[in-house]
Amino acid sequence: MRELTSNELLYIAGAMRWTILLSLVSLACGMLGGLILALARTSHVRVLRLSVVAYFKVMQGTPLLMQIFMAFFLPGVFGFDVNPFLAAAAALSLHASAFLGDIWRGCIEEVPKGQREAARALALPYIVTTLWVIIPQAVRLAVPPSVGFLVQLIKGTSLTALVGFVEITRAAQIVNNATFKPFVIFSFVCACYFIVCWPLSLFSRYLEGRMRIPSH
Amino acid sequence: MLYSFEFGDVIEAWPALVSGAANTLWLSAVSVLLGVVVAASGATAKTLGSRAVRFLVDCYIELIRNTPFLVQVFLIFFGLPAIGLKMSPNVAAVTAMVVNFAAYGIEIIRAGIESIPKGQIDAGKALGLGPFKIFRLVVFKPALQAVYPALTSQMILLMLNSSICSAIAATELTAVAGDIQSRTFRSFEVYSVVTAMYFGLSIFFWCVFAAVNSMLFKAGPRGAAR
């Protein structure tokens, strides 16, 4: 058995970089996917709308842990080797795209209908209307809940520990197996997550408060 | 493609999967019931309590909401025995789920309490309603209606999150899947079936909650009174 020293705690805290990297990659891919899904969800094409709704329901109606497991086992079916980071990032990106897509759908629907009609009357093409008329107005509403979701995403990365990706939670498990000081170790891990997530939560709430004033 | 799907082993294990799903439902139901009680007490404490009490409740909410459920589960199951609190996996799982659910439930229930204007209670008194009727018709029902969507989606989320408790070998659906997988090495088949089972449970609860919603808040002879 090993002693729990500051070296071990530093090793755990250092693994936080994988948690953050995984969160950022998933956030970026999830935002791209979410934007496409939100636009598809609010489009006039019925088939597109319905298939996006089905995707949202599947992702919101199954556990994130199962989504991560599937991302780890599906490549094997096709004979590919699984890179843990890529599989974890793929699962979390798909997860984020569904939740961000649904949040942003609400924000796009909040933009008054007349805006798109006016742009249409001015003969602006769909892509110009979307980029320069709809999205700038929807973004104002979208930022606070998206930052809130980022906290969920960061916490969600901890589940990749269960398939063996060494981020902070997995690093803590490894150290715990060698030193067996679970109370100290997992409290320390909680503190690490808290340091990252709490400011984001506060920021999200602050933005929400600022957004609310002009609308009333 | 060389891979051949083999669902036989998974289908053969259906009794284990069904009992795993039943356990998931049982653990979730117990956690939701206890969680609502804890959340309601927390919401009451935050509404009526002194500054110190309110501060403590706030600390609890922030601590739980900004740390992952998995680490909370580990802390409760592996960490607490170190300070003399030993629990079986299922008890630890329920404890973790109650603690986690309450952190979200407190704010939801408090929003419900605050959605009732004071004048509404006075109006109930003016109409000559007794205190029990005032609580039931003027306070509880409108408050429940106000928070119903948030509360029910939090409950479904708890059911889905219970899969994380497989990490400490609580005997729920995901843990059963892990057993079958380690016996048959049919990971993809097992987990796709189990994912579909979770989705089925979610659909079931979406339908049940929607039906209860229209029964309680829309139709019925007293529907007009809301």
Image (cartoon, coloured by chain):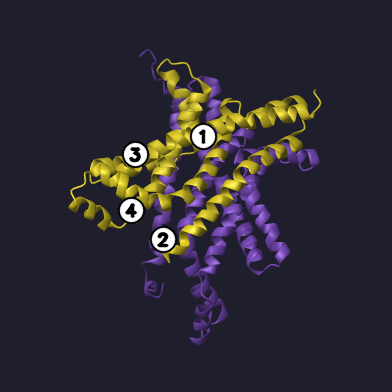
Residue on which the image places disc 1: A24
Mark-to-mark CA distance, 4 and 1: 27 Å
Depth check: A39 or B43 in front? A39
Q: Amino acid at mark 1?
A: Leu
Mark-to-mark CA distance, 4 and 2: 24 Å
Mark-to-mark CA distance, 3 and 2: 32 Å
**Residue A1, relative to residue A207: is it above or below?**
above
Q: Say whether mark 3 and mark 1 are on the same chain.
A: yes
Q: Specify few, some or many for label 4: CA neighbours under 10 Å numbering under 14, 14-19, or 20 or more.
A: few
Residue on which the image places disc 3: A36
Residue on which the image places disc 4: A109
Give the purple chain's letter: B
- Labels 1 & 3 near each other (Cβ < 8 A): no
Q: Secondary structure at mark 2?
A: helix
Between marks 3 and 2 in the image, the one whose residue lies nearer the viewer: 3
- Labels 4 & 2 near each other (Cβ < 8 A): no
Give the yellow chain's letter: A
Which of the chains bears the disc numbered 1? A
Q: Secondary structure at mark 4?
A: helix
* Residue A165 located left or right of residue B211: right
Q: Secondary structure at mark 3?
A: helix
Mark-to-mark CA distance, 1 and 3: 19 Å
Q: Specify few, some or many for label 3: CA neighbours under 10 Å numbering under 14, 14-19, or 20 or more.
A: some
Of mark 3 and mark 4, the one earlier in the sequence is: 3
Mark-to-mark CA distance, 1 and 2: 38 Å
x and y percent of residue B199 in the render?
Answer: 43, 40
Residue found at the far top of this picture: B2
